Image: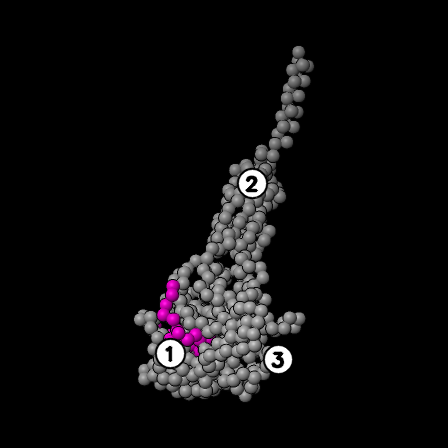
């Protein structure tokens, strides 16, 4: 009896030891003798979620056992261009698409979540306003804004049609008339003519209650017709005064705008011959009205270009799009976007317009002769010319948010055009005019100057 009892006690002890050693949930001693509980599994609180661009989301993990000793996690995203995740499991949606977010423990237990970043839906609307004066379109004009008033100088209202060998033209290719649009009254008033040489494809900007117009060209196919003079306009008295010439090469299709009391002018084309090469530039200059001086700043860091867009948001300026030269393709349209910090004189490439447009259209995101403005801490760019697209004039429009560095669509403008007019008074934005090219038949081509004006309603 004693032998039998001893046998069963030994068998029970053996089974207890085996069972205890195979149970990972039971504490294991560490080197210092403290209990250690191994992670058996982990589970994420969400298996699949949807986010909009710029959204953030915090993920959390449940450990088994709940008193696991080592809860260290490594977070990863299989597509950081779509969703980023930090070391705390906080997600940031970057661009439309799908990404798998994985959390991994020290002992290689894993759990995952699928994140779908939604394609932004267009917002905003366009409301019709008084058309350009006398029912005559305008494009390639120099424009600026003072207070709630918008000023349009020079440009072209030239139109033509070609049908079975007959060419009919109207308007002037190079103008010097000057108009003011009152956004409060929704009305146009003609002012004293611009006193410089009639021109098109110049630039305009305003600072400290005054407007400025310069550059451009006064004829086609004439290298001597490119201009570098600049003029200051004082609305108190409707008076023009010539100021120092632009110190760079004479040019047209340049980019010019003002931000925080400083004007920026540069890029553009310095060849005006039909048979000559397209000659874009990348030099940039600033004009300070307080000292009446031009100062060259760091060259634009992107490709040389003309017909680009530029404006200021906050303390920085932004420049992009435009016509460039690609050796294998010749003249082409850019879609890149750059930020310049005046405090450091450094250009930084930001998210290309391509990243926003390709969610809707995989082929046509570059453009030249577009229009743009800034309002409410955001930038707006749209319309313009795309060589590989027909009709080559666009009517799409995009909002750029510098906070999350991304492009979102706004509703299309009700008409197509390039080389139009666009401006913001700070809390209201408008666009109009421009040029439209239409192939109306096998031997029929129409070139039309647009008279429309619209206000953007966010």
For marks 3 and 1, the one nearer the N-term is: 1
Q: Check disc 1: other Cα within 10 Å, few if <14, some if 14-19, many if 20+.
A: many
Q: CA distance from mark 2 to mark 1?
A: 69 Å
The residue carrying mark 2 is 42
The number of numbered badges drawn on the structure is 3
Image coloring type: one colour
Residue drawn 44% across the image and 69% down it: 373
Tell me, for residue 120, which label it has, or none: none
Q: Is residue 108 above or below residue 80?
A: above
Q: CA distance from mark 3 to mark 1?
A: 34 Å
* Image quadrant containing the C terminus: bottom left
Residue 261 among those drawn in magenta: no
The answer to which of 362 and 156 lies nearer the viewer is 156
Residue drawn 41% across the image and 87% down it: 195
Q: What percent of the width, then of the height, locates residue 41?
A: 58, 38
The residue carrying mark 3 is 277
Instruction: Point out the residue furthest to the top here.
Output: 1
| Residue range of the region highlighted in magenta in the rendering | 127-150
Residue 131 among those drawn in magenta: yes
The residue carrying mark 1 is 179
The answer to which of 21 and 215 lies nearer the viewer is 215
């Amino acid at each position: 009896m004693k032998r039998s009892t001893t046998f069963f006690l030994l068998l029970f002890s053996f089974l207890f030891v085996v069972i205890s050693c195979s149970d990972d949930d039971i504490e294991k001693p560490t080197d210092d003798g403290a209990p250690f509980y191994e992670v058996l599994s982990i589970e994420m609180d969400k298996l699949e979620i949807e986010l909009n661009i710029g959204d953030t989301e915090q993920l959390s993990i449940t450990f088994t056992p709940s008193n696991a000793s080592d809860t260290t996690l490594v977070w990863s995203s299989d597509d950081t261009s779509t969703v980023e995740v930090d070391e705390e499991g906080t997600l940031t949606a970057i661009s439309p698409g799908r990404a798998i977010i994985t959390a991994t423990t020290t002992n290689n237990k894993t759990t995952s979540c699928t994140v779908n970043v939604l394609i932004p839906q267009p917002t905003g609307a366009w409301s019709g306003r008084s058309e350009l004066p006398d029912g005559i379109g305008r494009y390639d004009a120099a424009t600026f804004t003072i207070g709630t008033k918008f000023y349009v100088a020079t440009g072209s209202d030239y139109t033509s049609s070609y049908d079975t060998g007959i060419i009919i033209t109207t308007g002037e290719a190079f103008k010097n008339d000057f108009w003011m649009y009152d956004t409060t009254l929704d009305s146009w008033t003609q002012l004293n003519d611009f006193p410089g040489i009639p021109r098109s494809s110049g630039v305009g900007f305003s600072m400290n209650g005054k407007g400025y117009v310069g550059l451009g060209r006064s004829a086609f196919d004439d290298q001597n017709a490119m201009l570098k003079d600049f003029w200051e306009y004082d609305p108190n008295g409707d008076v023009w005064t010539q100021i120092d010439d632009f110190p760079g090469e004479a040019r047209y299709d340049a980019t010019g705008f003002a931000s925080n009391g400083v004007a920026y002018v540069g890029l553009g084309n310095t060849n005006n011959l039909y048979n000559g090469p397209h000659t874009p530039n990348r030099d940039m200059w600033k004009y300070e009205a307080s000292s009446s001086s031009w100062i060259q700043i760091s060259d634009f860091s992107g490709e040389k270009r003309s017909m680009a867009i530029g404006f200021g948001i906050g303390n920085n300026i932004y420049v992009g799009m435009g016509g460039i030269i690609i050796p294998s393709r010749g003249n082409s349209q850019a879609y890149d976007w750059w930020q310049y910090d005046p405090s450091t004189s450094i250009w930084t490439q930001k998210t290309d317009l391509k990243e926003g447009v390709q969610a809707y259209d995989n082929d046509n995101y570059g453009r030249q002769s577009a229009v743009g403005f800034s309002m409410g801490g955001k930038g707006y760019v749209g319309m313009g010319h795309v060589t590989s697209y027909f009709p080559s004039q666009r009517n799409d429009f995009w909002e750029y948010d510098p906070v999350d560095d991304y492009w979102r669509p706004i509703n299309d403008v009700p008409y197509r055009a390039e080389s139009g007019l666009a401006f913001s008074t700070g809390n209201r934005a408008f666009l109009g005019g421009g040029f439209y090219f239409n192939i109306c038949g096998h031997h029929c081509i129409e070139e039309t100057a647009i008279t429309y004006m619209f206000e953007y309603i966010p």
